[in-house]
Amino acid sequence: MSPPIEVTHFTDPGCPWAYSASPAHTVLRWRYGDGLSWRLVMIGLTEDASQYERRGYTPARVAQGYRSFRRFGMPLRVQPKAAVAATSPACRAIVAARLLAPGSEEAAYRALQLMQFTSAGLLDRPGDLRGALETVPGLDAARAIEMIDAPQVREAYERDRAEARSAAGSPTEAQDRAAATDGAVRYTAPSLVFQAPGQRLEAGGFQPLEAYDVLIANLDPTLARTPPPPQARAVLERFPAGLTTQEVAAVMTPNNLEPYRAEAEGQLIELVAEGVAQRVPVGDDALWRAT
């Protein structure tokens, strides 16, 4: 059996492009399972909210901007927040989760994304961060927030930032999917770098599912590939933490086509009626969980 393909995910919980890529990434997890080994690297888009303010961002402008991401299907809240927030504290909270409870960082990242895009919570307010992280199984949320400024967290975070800012001369830069907003050329969220023995392929920034699929097929054409399930219940059972409507639809749709959202939602509603699923309102949509 071939070793799993390593996937380095350069990202930030404050990036709407990264959030919008969630359906495609969920498909990869369903399709390839343990054939992919994921690693999160925090970009740290801003260290202080003033960086966004100097670029002209306001709560209203941010909320207005989210409207353009509706086409990707993830739940959104377009009511302006109380302030524009830096993303560094949230990134460091995710790093703290990684150090405290290895393996919990993916769930921590997901929780903070949902907070950012579907609630009034701010990514640089400790109380808001703690509230979101309290939903992560096996993680001491209070301790994670206490550690945000700890030396070991700061050091690990700076290693992430440095790695994220190593995109100069890369295929990502060649495709104009890199950025240099704070100096060094960095990977934009949600860049995925796929690595197999002796091979490295990049999908820089936001990419369609087909791009990921092509890279994986070229890295290892023998990798087991799980077909899409005909029933939404199988998807919820595979992802017990819950998925959005668009994520479920993407997993159920064959051949990398546009997700069959209406069909998936119809099945999910029936599952709730049967008492085997739960619908939790989130933003302008919902999370669906098996019961």
Image (cartoon, rainbow, N blue to C red):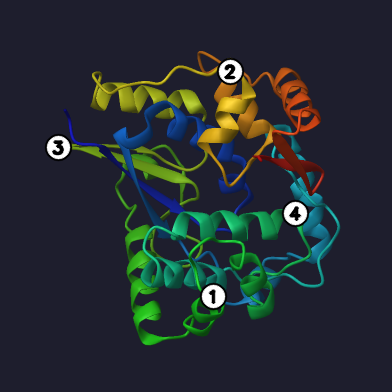
Question: Marks 4/1: CA distance?
Answer: 22 Å
Amino acid type, label 3: Pro
Of circles 4 and 1, the one toward us is 4
Q: Nearer the viewer, residue 42 or 279?
A: 279
Question: Marks 3/1: CA distance?
Answer: 35 Å
User: Where in the figure is residue 16, as x and y percent of width and height?
Assistant: 64, 49
Q: Which mark is residue 117?
A: none
Question: On screen, 270 above or below 107?
Answer: above
Tag 4 and tag 2, C-beta contact below 8 Å: no
Amino acid type, label 4: Thr
Label 1 sits on residue:
47
Q: Residue at x 62, y 41 (%)?
A: 20
Question: Marks 3/4: CA distance?
Answer: 40 Å
Q: Residue at x 13, y 37 (%)?
A: 198
Q: Residues within 10 Å of mark 4 (few under 14, many from 20)?
A: many
Comes first in the chain, label 4 or label 1: 1
Q: Which mark is residue 118?
A: 4
Is residue 205 shown left or right of residue 242? left
Is residue 21 shown left or right of residue 288? left
Q: Residues within 10 Å of mark 1 (few under 14, many from 20)?
A: some
Mark 1 falls on what kind of element? loop
Label 2 sits on residue:
253
Question: Marks 2/3: CA distance?
Answer: 31 Å
User: Where in the figure is residue 201, as x and y percent of width and height?
Assistant: 29, 35
Question: Marks 1/2: CA distance?
Answer: 39 Å
Comes first in the chain, label 3 or label 1: 1
User: Where in the figure is residue 48, as x and y percent of width and height?
Assistant: 59, 77
Question: On screen, 282 above or below 184?
Answer: above
Label 3 sits on residue:
197
Position of the C terminus by quadrant: top right
Question: Marks 4/2: CA distance?
Answer: 25 Å
